[in-house]
Image: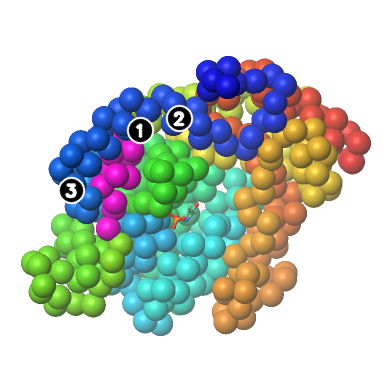
Amino acid sequence: MTTVDRPVTTGRVPLVDLGIQRDRVAGEVAEGFARVLATTAFVQGPDVAAFEEEFAAFTGRAHCVGVGNGTDALEFALRAAGVGPGDPVALPANTFVASAEAVLRAGARPVPVDVDDEHLLLDPRALEAVAGECRAVLPVHLFGQMAPMTEIAEVAGRHGLVVVEDAAQAQGATHRGVPMGGWGTAAGTSFYPGKNLGAYGDAGAVTTDDPGVARTVRLLANHGSEVKYQHPVLGFNSRLDTLQAVVLRAKLHRLAGWNAERVAAAERYAELLAGIPGVRLPSAAPGNAHVWHLYVVRVPDRDAVLADLDAAGIGAGVHYPVPVHLTGALAPAGHGPGDFPVAERAAGEILSLPLFPGITPAQQERVAEALATAVARRG
Ligand SMILES: *Cc1c(COP(=O)(O)O)cnc(C)c1O
C-alpha cells in the first residue's frame, strides 16, 4: 500500500488529518533529525534556539522561550508575570481545562466568567463585573481567533490587571494586526500535535516583550538554573525538546500558507452550510484575522447529530462538552450549573467539523451533506 493514494472521497473524513502535514515536511524533518542524531544535541541543541528566534519573529515579540507543553507555558508565564498564591485570575468558562490547570498550578485562584454568545470568547462585560476582585486575567484565543483584546485590555488597564494570554489555539491569529503576546505581559502557546503549529509530541512556548519575564520562564523551565548546578529558585524540567524544535521549524515557515488553507476551507463551509436551517455558523469577531483552528457550528440535539455524523463516516468533535467551571478540577471553586448560562447552553450545541490544511472540497461537501441530513432528521 502506498501513502500517496489516499481515498479522499469515500473514506472516513477525520476531524484532523495530521498525515498530510507530516508528508509535506517529511524530507526536511528527516534531514533535521539526522543532524540532531549526528551531534547528539538532544537537549537545548541549536535547533531550539533557532526555533525560539523564528517563532519570536513570527509573533512580532522580542522573546520566545520554548517549554515542554502549553500548560507549563501558561503556568510559567503567570508566575513570571508575578501571579501567585491566592491571586484571583479571571478566565472564560468555555475553554480547555488546561487554562484553569495553569492558574491552579501557579497557586492562583481561577475566577471563571461567561463568554459572549456569538463567538464564545471571554465577554468583556462579564470581566468588568469581577475585575475589581481580580489580580489578573487569562483571555483565551479560542478556535483560532483572538479574544476581544481591545476591550479586555481597556478593562484590565482600568483595574490594574495583569494580562497573560492563552494563545494555544491562535498561532498566526491577530487582533487589530497584533498577534499573541502583544496584548499582555506574555502569551503561552501549545504545539500539541493537533494545534495549527503542531509538534510530534508535547511542546509549548511563552512569547513576551519583557526580558525579565522571558528570563524567569527560562529559569522555571530549566530546574531554576541559568548556570549549571546553580539553582537560585525552585524550578521544573520542562524544556522544549530538540527533536520537536526540528519539526516546529520545518512547519513554521509553512504555517502562513497552511493557515490560508484553513481560511479557504472555512469560507467553503460557510458557502456549503449557508442554507441549512438550524445550523448556526461561526464568524470572525471585529478586528480579528481568524486562523480557524476549529470550525465550530451550533446545532440542536447535538449529541444525536454527532452520532449520525459518526455513522456517516464524519469525524466531528466537541470543544468542549463540559464548561470548565463544571469540571471536577474546579470543584473547589464552588460553581454549579446556571452560573455561566451562555457557556453552559453552548456546551450542548457546539460541534467541531473536520478542518485541516489539505482537506478537499469533496470531503467538505460530504461533511455538509451528512450534516444537513442529520440536522433535518433530528431537528
Ligand atoms: C491545547 C491547549 C492548552 C494546553 O496545551 P498542552 O500543550 O496540551 O498542555 C491550553 N489552552 C488551550 C485553550 C488549549 O487548546
Q: Earlier in the sequence, mark 3 or mark 1?
A: 3
Q: Which residue is mark 3?
A: 41
**Vertical side of 265 occupied by 229: above or below:** below
**CA gap, disc 3 and disc 1:** 20 Å
In x, y percent, where is residue 227?
8, 67
- Viewer-side label of 3, 1: 3
244 inside magenta stretch: yes
The first of marks 2 and 3 along the sequence is: 2
Dot 1 lies on which element?
helix
Under mark 2, the amino acid is: Gln
- Whole-number angstrom distance, CA of label 2 to CA of label 3: 25 Å
Q: Which mark is residue 21?
A: 2
Q: Name the residue carrying label 1.
A: 251
Residue nearest the observer in this picture, 179 or 362: 362
**Viewer-nearest of discs 2 and 3:** 3
234 up-or-down from 368: above or below: below
Q: Quadrant of residue 106?
A: bottom left
Q: Amino acid at mark 1?
A: Lys
Region of the chain picked out in magenta, as a range: 239-251
